[in-house]
Image (spheres, rainbow, N blue to C red):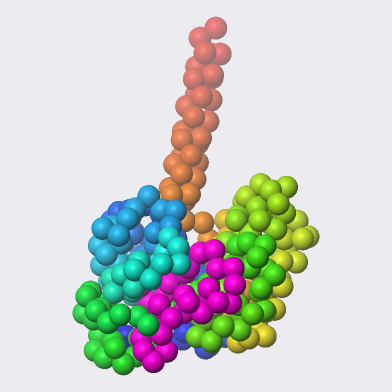
Amino acid sequence: MIKNKLKQIWAEGRASLNGWLSIGNAFSAEIMASQGYDSIAIDVQHGALDYSSVLPMFQAMRASGVVPLARVPWLEPGIIMKVLDAGAYGVICPMIGTAEQAAEFVSYVRYPPHGQRSFGPTRVSFASGANYAGEANAEILAFAMIETKQAMQNLDAIAATPGLDGIYVGPADLTLSITDGRLAPAFDREEPEMIEALQRIVAACKANGIKAALHCGTPDYAARAIGWGFDMTTVSGDSRLLAAAAAASVARFRELVGNKAANSEKGAY
């Protein structure tokens, strides 16, 4: 089986950069995967896509050698197993609030005797190389999302779950939950209470020998998060990057053409 490059990066003491796909299109996935990310996650939860988009997106990303990940919609065995069979080398599961839920999630990712994943790796048996059944348990990553007040209350127990590889922080939902809606959902939090929560999560991960990952809006904040001890950061995503680049291009055009128009009008008089 082709080895999981994220594990190699972390073993070397380096942090990894993850990309994010919310647009259900194989070509845009191929473009994103060619930009130098260490891994790319397909957002099956909130993305504008469904499973019929997931498999061709994984196929399109394969040539780049980027590690393919997926965020599933919920703690549900069917979709977890299907994204793995389609080629995911890691699963991010949202809204994990208890150690029991974390253990249930891990069981869906691992083959027996370490879990209850059903065998039938339709595409990944071709995409990952030989001996997938024998090596998948050791190579596939299971990330539980911490994004609720309940999860923070059970943080240490969740982080201690056998077989869990890491915690992935969803800062928008986490902000909504632990502040009871007092703060609006957003990335790159600056509030002391939110930074304290993020650092608590890092500490719990380090204490249990698992990885900490954070969804960020900008490279600058991601770099700060790495300084706090996060092992993986996601920086923005395809839809936001597309919108930002388009907006900047349009704004620059309006600025240049508007100035020329204004100068022409002045010259006419």
176 up-or-down from 208: above or below: above
Instruction: Look at the image and give the residue range highlighted in magenta.
Output: 88-115
21 up-or-down from 82: above or below: above
221 up-or-down from 7: above or below: above
Query: Which residue occupies 47% across, 84% down?
Result: 7
Query: Which residue occupies 65% across, 65% down?
Result: 150
Identify the residue at the far front of this view.
100
Q: Quadrant of residue 32?
A: bottom left
Instruction: Report x, y in % for residue 202.
Output: 66, 75
Can residue 238 be seen here? The reply is no
Can residue 27 be seen here? The reply is yes
Query: Which residue occupies 54% across, 19% down?
Result: 262
- Magenta-colored stretch includes residue 261: no
Query: Which residue occupies 27% across, 64% down?
Result: 55
Apparent side of residue 214 relative to residue 199 in the rendered image (left or right):
left
Instruction: Report x, y in % for residue 208.
Output: 63, 86
Q: Nearer the viewer, residue 212 or 79?
A: 79
Instruction: Report x, y in % for residue 235.
Output: 53, 61
Q: Nearer the viewer, residue 14 or 87?
A: 87
Instruction: Report x, y in % for residue 170.
Output: 57, 61
The image quadrant where one finds the C terminus is top right
Q: Nearer the viewer, residue 256 or 41?
A: 41
The image quadrant where one finds the N terminus is bottom left
Q: Quadrant of residue 263?
A: top right
Apparent side of residue 132 relative to residue 249 in the rendered image (left or right):
left
109 up-or-down from 76: above or below: below
Identify the residue at the far top of this view.
269
- Magenta-colored stretch includes residue 113: yes
